[in-house]
Amino acid sequence: MTGFKSDFLRVLSERGFVHQISDPEGLDTACVKGQITAYIGFDATATSLHAGSLLPIMMLHWMQETGHRPIALMGGGTTMVGDPSGKDESRKLLTKEAIDGNIAGIRRIFSHFLDFDGGRAIMANNADWLLKLNYVDFLRDVGRHFSVNRMLAFDSVKLRLEREQPLSFLEFNYMVLQAYDFVELARRHDCILQMGGSDQWGNIVSGIDLGRRIADASLYALTCPLLTTSSGAKMGKTASGAVWLDGALTSPWDFWQYWRNTEDADVVRFLKLYTKLPLDEIARLGALGGAEINEAKKVLATELTALVHGREAAEASAETARKTFEEGALAANLPTIEVARAELEAGLGVLAAFVRAGLAASNGEARRAVAGGALKVNDLPVSDDKARLTLDDVTADGVVKLSQGKKKHVLLKPV
């Protein structure tokens, strides 16, 4: 999708953020005329966002960089309901106090990407209006504009029902509340655009329709693609669990390592999406062949770690990696065992892998070591004893590093 006149849509398009736009010409014209306001919603289910949230965060960042006003909408109200999109089961319901604590943690993360001074960016909380609604009035004024027939056709509902998995009435209301958020933000902040992942298209379009019906508002939708790695793995997930943006949950070093191990086929795409490097510099890095592609991966890891944790932490992580691996402090003398590539393709149980590597005498011993935080995969602690090692865990050096404690290390090499 090309030919945009506005810097905002042109940057998003060139960098690969755009999947679908409800009215490309109308939105482009609005962006050219002057500053617009747009939002993306984030449910506060944890004290931190994880790497899977970086795509929408960067969309808000580029919006501000190109002269517009972003809103990071915290789901203080909708988190109490739970978004069924892409979920096979209902979320655990959180208390208001827990949600407020999560929002405080998430705000600290956004401060690295957005400048909130002087209202240049806004962090809103839909609890401010959703928790004050009168249920019967809401049904009469808003609920009557929603067709249950149409709601049942949305993927977030249809897939759950087709799998015969329960969908609570509470969750069924989520799309109504999200649509109402759009209308409320249009009233409060003159917000005309909602952005989100492609799985949110139905919910966002419902907001556009509601705004037209009850406020005669012209609203727009823009979605980004749902990212997986080239091998199909979900972004931000490892055998050790989620890759968090809070340094207390995932250290800058572990965060750097995660991006350093990006698959070759993903490097250019991720440089465009997750860094602020100019496109010509990204093209130069993408042209590197053979082992030189590892240099592009280090740039990706360092630039992204700098955005999330600061330049000093990023440079320190890069230097630690250089000393540890490139100077041979560990890797040159580590024992290596071979494992059939087909086993990793099918998924090798993490406990069995440590037993085979001689780092545990039995699955039971390995399970106890996991509980004690003693086992690591690629220097990331293993938190799930049911996790499986796959080809996604093979590093750029062609191995999976298993560690028991600080001194025992074995490399698994697929053959």
Image: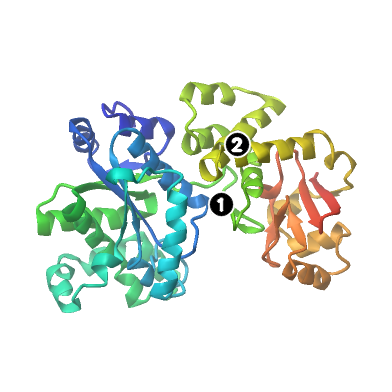
Q: Nearer the viewer, mark 1 or mark 2?
A: 2
Residue 265 is drawn in which quadrant? top right
Q: Nearer the viewer, residue 109 or 385?
A: 109
Colouring of the image: rainbow
**Mark 1, other Cα within 10 Å: few <14 / some 14–19 / many ≥20:** many
Quadrant that contains the C terminus: top right
The relative height of residue 221 versus residue 95 in the rendered view (above or below) is above
Number of numbered tags placed on the structure image: 2
Q: Nearer the viewer, residue 74 or 388?
A: 74
Q: Nearer the viewer, residue 80 or 386?
A: 80
Q: Residue at x 48, y 56 (%)?
A: 49
Query: Could you tell me if residue 306 is visible in this image?
Result: yes
Percent of width and height locating residue 323: 78, 36
Q: Residue at x 49, y 21 (%)?
A: 280
The relative height of residue 406 versus residue 282 in the rendered view (above or below) is below
Numbered badge on residue 236: 1
Say what amino acid the circle numbered 1 marks.
Gly
Q: Nearer the viewer, residue 95 or 300?
A: 95
Say what amino acid the circle numbered 2 marks.
Thr
Choose the circle earlier in sequence order: 1 or 2: 1
Percent of width and height locating residue 242: 58, 57
Q: Quote the CA–CA distance across marks 1 and 2.
A: 17 Å
Numbered badge on residue 302: 2
Percent of width and height locating residue 29: 19, 32
Contact, mark 1 vs mark 2 (Cβ under 8 Å):
no
253 sits left or right of 242 in the view? right
